[in-house]
Image: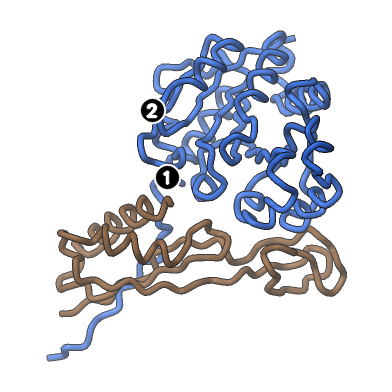
């Protein structure tokens, strides 16, 4: 349950960013990869607690879950495997380069003028 | 005048602060020539017992220090303190993982140049430590024979972010009806090509191989100076 630490880091980052733009932050968009180690429901719950009593108390959190995307170093095929079985479907090379799925990113802010 | 909301692109990693600090630590470790290895596992998998034995063995030829994370108590530091004089407990309170900041402040007054190895024992937890880079050169995930062979499938992220897997308490494998082949297969399906070591800190099975493996990770310069 480290989602609260993550929500607090997010809050700080958003506050810094928001200070540079006039207006009210209506919503924030984040990307959470399946291999980021972060649970989306727990993050939503933690966000509710983290934002309380701050200037972002009414800010909605919008999460985009990023699936795993890997590229085979042998044959170049890209695919989205199950996190439990990372293996090239074409040439069965086991070691795959991870292209996406580890994200834990603050993507954008939606600001009301 | 428009009332449409504006979209401001940020595209910044949420744990950027941790990642930046971890990168600085990694550079500092490399400059000091110290090999830093972190250990993660669920509570009760035998991390401390294994580390105590490993440190005693490696300590005969190398200079070793350890940081150990727990929510409360300094029991583990006291146990590791039997194998090395330089051990420091990080008590996290309610925090379920170590982060780069905790590591950096615990090391503040240590001379890293005087060390060959620094071991970091994370809080017993297979979920949260996966997200935090500590600047370590290598992350080792431990799985004990009594936990069941399907742990890698239940916690794929931590196995995927680790570099080495160790199966501990291997002396109990038969009693716990632990299926070694299935455990290896599960680890490899989550993290193909992963090196797997099997060990029993109690009987000493696999300890020599494990010690040799870690010793081989030392930078060449430190290897010369400490032999």
Chain where mark 2 sits: B
Q: Residue at x 23, y 76 (%)?
A: A26
Residue at disc 2, secondary structure: helix
* Residue lying at the far bottom of the rendered structure: B1
- Residue A103 drawn above or below residue B29: below
**Chain B colour as displayed:** blue
Q: Nearer the viewer, residue B20 or B136?
A: B136
Q: Which mark is residue B105?
A: 2
**Chain A colour as displayed:** brown
Residue A35 lies in what quarter of the image? bottom right
Q: Position of residue B130 (x, y in %)?
A: 54, 48
Q: Position of residue B50 (x, y in %)?
A: 67, 25
Q: Position of residue B211 (x, y in %)?
A: 76, 22
Q: Residue at x 50, y 15 (%)?
A: B78
Q: Which quarter of the figure is the C terminus of chain B placed in? A: top right
Question: Mark 1–mark 2 contact, CB under 8 Å?
Answer: no
Chain where mark 1 sits: B
Identify the residue position indicated by label 1 in the image: B18
Residue at disc 1, secondary structure: helix
Q: Position of residue B41 (x, y in %)?
A: 60, 40
């Amino acid at each position: 349950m480290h989602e609260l630490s993550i929500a607090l880091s997010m809050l700080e980052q958003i506050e810094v960013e928001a200070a540079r733009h006039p207006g009210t932050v209506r919503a924030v968009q984040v990307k959470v990869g399946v291999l980021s180690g972060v649970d989306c429901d727990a993050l939503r719950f933690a966000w509710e607690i983290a934002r309380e009593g701050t200037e972002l108390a009414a800010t909605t959190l919008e999460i985009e879950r990023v699936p795993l995307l890997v590229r085979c170093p042998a044959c170049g095929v890209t695919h989205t495997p199950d996190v439990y079985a990372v293996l090239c479907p074409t040439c069965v090379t086991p070691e795959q380069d991870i292209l996406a799925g580890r994200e834990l990113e603050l993507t954008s802010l939606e600001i009301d003028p | 005048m428009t009332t449409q909301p504006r979209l401001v692109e940020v595209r910044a990693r949420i744990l950027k602060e941790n990642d930046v600090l971890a990168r600085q630590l990694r550079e500092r470790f490399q400059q000091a020539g110290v090999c830093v290895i972190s250990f993660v596992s669920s509570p009760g998998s035998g991390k401390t017992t294994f580390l105590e034995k490993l440190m005693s063995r490696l300590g005969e030829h190398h200079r070793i220090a350890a940081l150990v994370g727990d929510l409360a108590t300094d029991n583990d530091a006291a146990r590791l303190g039997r194998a090395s004089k330089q051990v420091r407990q990080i008590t996290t309170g309610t925090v379920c993982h170590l982060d780069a900041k905790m590591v950096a402040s615990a090391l503040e007054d240590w001379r890293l140049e005087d060390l060959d190895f620094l071991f970091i024992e994370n809080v017993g937890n297979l979920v949260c430590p996966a997200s935090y880079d500590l600047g370590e050169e290598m992350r080792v995930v431990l799985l004990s024979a009594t936990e069941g062979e399907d742990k890698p499938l239940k916690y794929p992220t931590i196995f995927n972010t680790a570099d080495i897997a160790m199966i501990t308490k291997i002396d109990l494998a038969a009693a716990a009806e632990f299926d070694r082949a299935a455990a290896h297969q599960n680890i490899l399906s989550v993290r193909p090509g992963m090196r797997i070591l099997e060990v029993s800190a109690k009987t000493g099975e696999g300890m020599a191989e494990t010690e040799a493996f870690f010793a081989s990770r030392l930078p060449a310069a430190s290897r010369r100076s400490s032999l």
